[in-house]
Image (spheres, rainbow, N blue to C red):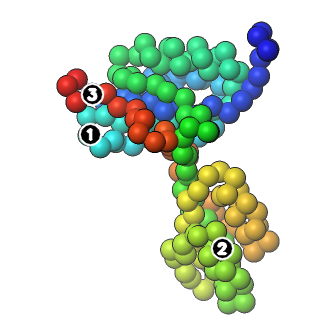
Amino acid sequence: MKGERSTNRHVISILVENHSGVLSRVSGLFSRRGYNIDSLSVGVTENPRFSRITIAAFGDDNIIYQIHKQLEKLIDVLEVTELESENSVCRELALIKVRADAGARSEIISIADIFRANVIDVSHAALTVEMTGDQSKIEAFIQLLVPYGIREIVRTGLTGVQRGAATLKISEEE
């Protein structure tokens, strides 16, 4: 309904010049408006002149719209698009270190297999598991590991692309 304000999760994909200071200027737009960035990932694209920034934030639709418009005004920002869940694929990487004595090790490995996660490190007292998926899948996996004793979790932040042939890139002539 017009005039209604809602707080939703927004995933914004930004193509930028690969220069120092760009990330600071982009993230500053959010902080100046009092919005926390829930997830942030940055990496170079297929062309080393450009980087892709993916930001997930919860916010009022109107404020996110204003941030979008302000992002487009930054000199180093080339393209901005919101990745809507029905038109995009988003994933996150998590490394989870869990207590795993000899008795629990096979149970944890079975859970990892069900979630298509990979055991990447084994010691006498712990396993480290690599998991890639959407946030709800990673959260479900983590909840199943909680009873074993999670020692450490490291997450990359959300990254994503539009489905199909749509791309966030400038033409080769530019």
Q: Would you say residue 97 is visible in this rendering?
A: no
Location of residue 127 by image quarter: bottom right
SS category of the residue bearing label 1: loop
Instruction: Say which amino acid is labelled 2.
Output: Ile
Residue 60, compared with residue 3, is above or below; it is: below
Of 98 and 117, nearer the camera is 117
Q: Residue at x 55, y 46 (%)?
A: 90
Q: Which residue is mark 2?
A: 114
Q: Would you say residue 3 is visible in this rendering?
A: yes
Left or right relative to 31: residue 44? left
Quadrant in which the N terminus is drawn: top right
As measured in the structure, the alpha-carbon distance from the residue carrying label 3 to the one carrying label 1 is: 11 Å
Q: Which residue is mark 1?
A: 47
Left or right relative to 90: residue 171? left
Q: Residue furthest bottom?
A: 102
Q: Which residue is mark 3?
A: 171
Of 25 and 58, nearer the camera is 58
As measured in the structure, the alpha-carbon distance from the residue carrying label 2 to the one carrying label 3 is: 42 Å
Instruction: Say which amino acid is labelled 1.
Output: Asn
Q: Residue at x 22, y 30 (%)?
A: 172
* Camera-nearest label, 2 or 1: 2
Instruction: Say which amino acid is labelled 3.
Output: Ser
Q: Position of residue 97 (x, y in %)?
A: 62, 69
Q: Residues within 10 Å of mark 2 (few under 14, many from 20)?
A: few
Q: Residue furthest top?
A: 3
